[in-house]
Each structure stands twice: as structure tokens, then as C-alpha cells.
Image (cartoon, rainbow, N blue to C red):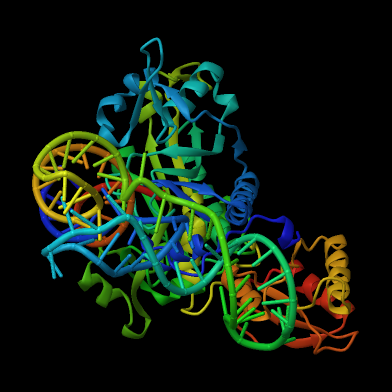
Amino acid sequence: MRLSNYFLPVLKENPSEAKIKSHQLMLRSGMVRQSASGIYSWLPLGLKVLKNIENIVRDEQNKAGAIELLMPTIQSADAWKESGRYDDYGKEMLRIKDRQDRDLLYGPTNEELITQIFRDNIKSYKNLPLLLYHIQWKFRDEIRPRFGVMRCREFLMKDTYSFDVNKQDAENSYKKMFLSYLKTFDRLDLKAIPMRADAGPIGGDLSHEFIILADTGESEVFLDKNLLDINIKKIDYDQNNIKNIMNKYENFYSATDEKHNIDQFNKLVDKKNQLHTRGIEVGHIFYFGDKYSKSLKAAINTKEGKNTYPQMGSYGIGVSRLPAAIIEAKYNNQYMKWPKSITPFKVTIINLGKKGDEVDKKSDDIYHILKNNNFDPLLDDLSDSPSSKFKNHDLIGIPFQIIIGSKMKKEEYEFKELGKNKIILSKNEIINRLKEIYESDQPS
RNA sequence: CGGGGCAUAGCGCAGCCUGGUAGCGCAUCUGGUUUGGGACCAGAGGGUCGCAAGUUCGAAUCUUGCUGCCCCGACCA
């Protein structure tokens, strides 16, 4: 993409309403703009990041065997009245009336709707287990939206729902999602720590929060450093493997401040392994049994020909929160640098030449080559001063820059990874370098 | 919802106390000079001062009401 044809409204100064780094950077780098309190437009750069995250989440759901569908944002209140949550959910639910005075709502979550779909279409144990998910905008009329897209009222969420014949199968589904979440966050280059949680308003008796570690996170967390070293990359979805990995996590102490027990912490964790830091909740999984299948009468036939209510769970990831969460986790007080898995552009070319000169032609040339190699390059072909270009490119956080100026010989290209020193490479070396970077498993 | 704060050009702010019809920096546009870490000169455009009512000859400025936004707390992906 040529910057001259793009829409990237960057700000030199921090808008006064933005108080935390991710919010400031997302506004300044032209990723988002606020439309109302807790409601945001995603501008092109931000949307690319959001979509990249969404696709990783989707890919890992698919690998775990979940099936994607799409439910609407606006729901009829009927199912919510059946489950009893129309009254329970309170003011956080945005209620709407249509022209016929029917009760509608902007979905804050989808247990009722998915259970309804299940009820209308599945009658037999033979169709289970079933994991269904969608990635859709939700609305929760938060008491106090804040921190930009971190705590929004309108937000994009991946939510999966599991249906199983019995509790044991349901636990297997739960474990699959547990692993899927670890893999998802790992691909986003995040250290996510699963922590036992209260089930909250969704109800149920088994629940984990997934917390990513960030100094500026909202909640205090306490954990054993050993948790940071567990490698889940090579683990497949075999139930034994999953069980082992879950056991590993459960073996080490971790807790949010509400659940923290200082005596246990000191007893179970060596002083040198004790980590007290902050975190951001990016995922939450629940097993809640037949709470909804029963209240919505979604019964199925068992092998024995009897009726039973399927055991359910739900599993959420705050997709639109993640760009901000990643910035909070990755920001090093000087620059933000997108993980290579979600960077909006894989590489950016900083053209320091004038329109039509040799430097300009060289930039154009490498731009086309990178484009043909599917590296989705951004080319800064504006006529700004060099210093302003450098600043802007550092701001938007694309991890790799190619700088083309008159200082270099014809066959030489400056290649710079954000936060590291420039190196001089040839055209072919650049291609190979980028291939190496983007085709390897190593996070950048 | 409780407590605090803010609202003046796209962004950051001054002006308000002491009323006289709006200004600065950045950004934008035009012309020229520049070009390796937020350049320079000259010129230009852009604001019913959040909304409404009141006081006054006169309101960005004083009064009242409303709305929006931000921060702290309870709640949450």
C-alpha cells in the first residue's frame, strides 16, 4: 500500500482523554476513533490488526474442532425471558423496542440464542459433542467504559458454546478450549496465564480466566514463574496431552488479587519464583452444565432412548480488547512493535527521495518486489521531511523498516528491526530475511 | 450509581477571576527554499466559544438548567 493512497490520520500530540499508553497510541497511530463513550470506529490500520487477531482466533478454534456460525447482534427478548436472564441481566443489557413494540436487545452474549438454535435442530446424542462459535459484536452498557477499546461498551468477541451428552464429555470440551486458548494467545506473542475464576453471572462451577501479563494491567496477579516456561506449541488436541498440560498449569500457583492467599503463595512457591505483577483479562471459559439447556428445554435423546439436557460450556475471547492488551503488554516505554503474527503491514519502506529521483525509483522497485512476494509492504511515498517520516513509522509500530536514501549505494538497502540497529543488505538478502522471519515459528 | 474534573478550529491549549464580539502552537491549503531523526520563509482557509434560558446596552467570560466526555470506586471479554 502506498501511503499516498492510504488513510492513516496520525496525531502528533496525545488527545487529552486518553490516559493509558495503548489508548494514546491507538489514537495517535490512526487505528481507532471514538464515536461515543465506549464505542469506537476502527480505521484502516486498526482494522488490519483486528482482522489479523480475529483470524488467528478463528484458526485455533477451527483446529480445536469448533464450527463457525454467525448469530445476529440484535436478538429477540423471548429466549431471554425463558432463561430468566431478561430480568437478571439488569441495566447492562441494552434494550430496544421495534415499531411493533416488540422487545429486542443488542446481544451482550449468546447462550440463549445458541441454545435455541441447538434446540430447534439437534435431537440426538449422535450429533454430540458439538462446539459452535461465532465472532460478533456485542454490547454491554458498562457502568464506566474506559481505557479506549480495553473496556468498551461495543466490543468484538469470539464466543464458543459446547454441547455434550454428559459431564465427562463436557469437561473434555472444556479442556479442548483451554488448550486452544493457550495456543491462540501464544500465537499472538502473549504470555497468557489461566487462573481459576468465579463463574460470575453466567453461572456454573468450573471456570478459568486467561490473564496476560502487563505492567499496566487492570488487576493484580500473583504467580509462580514456572508458569511462564510451559511450552504448548507442540501439544495437539489428544485428550491425554491436554490433561497433562492442564495438570502442569494447575501444579503452579496463580491467582488474581481477589483469590490470592498469601500464606498459600509463600508455602507453595519459592521466594525466587514468586511473581507479583499486573494483568489483563483477555479470555474467560465456563462450564455451566444444563443451566440453559434445561431452562430453554433443549433436550436430546440418549443412547438409551431417554431425554437428557446437554451439558454446556461457553468460552469467550475479547477480540477487540486484544490490540490494546497487546500494546500494554509489549510497550517498552519508547515504541510499540506489533508481533509479526498480527502486524498491519509486514514491512514498511521509508522513501527519503524526491518524486522521480533515483531514490524514489529504488523505493518503488523494492516495493513491487516485496508486493509480488506477498509481504504486504507499506511504502511511504509522501514528501514529508525524513525526520517526520521516521517518527511516524516508529509510531505505527510496523516491526521491520527498509530505509531508502541517498546515503546508500545502488545495491545497498538499510534494513531495520524496530528497537535494533540498522543493517545493510542486498535486495535478495532482504527477501530472504523477511521469508526467514515470517515463515519461522519464533515470535518476534 | 457515588465522588472529582473538563467542554474555545482537526489535535494540544490561552483568554473567563475584572463582560466590549476570539487568540497561540501543531496540523491543513498555496508558492518558494529544504530533505538521514518531528525543517524554513511568505501567504491563506477553518470556530453560531457543547446546548438552552436568564442578567446586561453588550456574554466565551456572570447565573440557572441540560447534555457530552474524562478520572477514582463497585462491575466486567
Image quadrant where one finds the N terminus of chain A: bottom right
Q: Position of residue A423 (x, y in %)?
A: 75, 88
Residue A77 at x, y = what percent?
A: 37, 20
Q: Is residue A314 left or right of residue A350?
A: left
Above or below, A21 against A419 in this view is above
Q: Report which quarter residue A350 is drawn in.
A: bottom right
A288, above or below A354, in the image: above
Q: In the rendering, at what x and y percent does residue A118 appear?
A: 51, 23
Residue ID at (44%, 24%): A75
Question: Residue at point 25% right, 30% down?
Answer: A88
User: Is residue A302 in sight in this rendering?
Assistant: no
A203 or A362: nearer the viewer: A362
The answer to whether residue A357 of the structure is visible from this angle is yes
> Where does the image place residue A357, in percent across and percent down from the top left?
87, 76
Q: Identify the residue at image location x=56%, y=30%.
A: A128
Q: Is residue B41 above or below residue A122?
A: below
